Image (cartoon, helix red, strand yellow):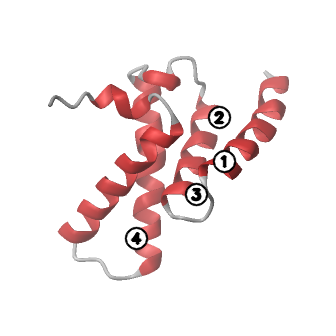
Amino acid sequence: MEINIVDYFVSMGALVPLVVLITDFVKRWLDIETGLVKQLISWVTAIGLCFAGMAFELGMFVDFNIVTTIVYGLAVGLVSNGIFDIKVVQLLLDFILKFVNKKE
């Protein structure tokens, strides 16, 4: 079975598990036990992957600008940290991006 990295960038639901896997790997590699540090690693990973998706024009990030990428990175961070589920975050994204897109 071949894994294609682009498959993780097709939706927020596909990207969240990649963030969780990378966060867990870094947490174990650095032997981190503190909850706050784990959350920070998850946020940085989520935003970093979203910027990588934008830079390499992967999946849903093909036409994203910097603001939209940051908003999606924060949203993926919310889901990967277990703060919200994808449905709630998608509603928030739709609401926020209406205002962002009006200004452009």
Q: Position of residue 1 (x, y in %)?
A: 14, 31
In this view, the mark in front (3 or 4): 3
Which mark lies nearer to you, 1 or 3?
A: 1
**Looking at the image, is mark 2 or mark 3 nearer the viewer?**
3
Left or right, 4 with reference to 64: left
Check disc 2 and give the amino acid type.
Val
Query: Callout 1, which amino acid?
Result: Lys
User: Is mark 3 in CB contact (under 8 Å) with mark 4?
Assistant: no
Front one among 34 and 84: 84
Q: Which mark is residue 38?
A: 4
Q: Disc 4 vs disc 2: which is toward the camera?
A: 4
Q: For the residues marked 4 and 2, what is the alpha-carbon distance in whole angstroms?
A: 25 Å
Residue 78: which disc?
A: 3
Residue 3 or residue 97, whichever sits in front: 3
Marked residue nearer the N-terminal end (1 or 4): 4
Tell me if label 1 and label 3 are in contact, CB under 8 Å: no
Q: Residues within 10 Å of mark 4 (few under 14, many from 20)?
A: some
Residue drawn at x 35%, y 28% is: 7
Q: Quadrant of residue 30?
A: bottom left
**Residue to which mark 2 is pinned:** 67
Q: Residue drawn 59% across and 31% down?
A: 66
Q: Picture coordinates of residue 14 (x, y %)?
A: 43, 39
Identify residue for label 1. Answer: 87
For image coordinates 50% across by 63% down, the residue present is: 81
Q: Nearer the viewer, mark 2 or mark 1?
A: 1
In which quadrant is the C terminus drawn?
top right
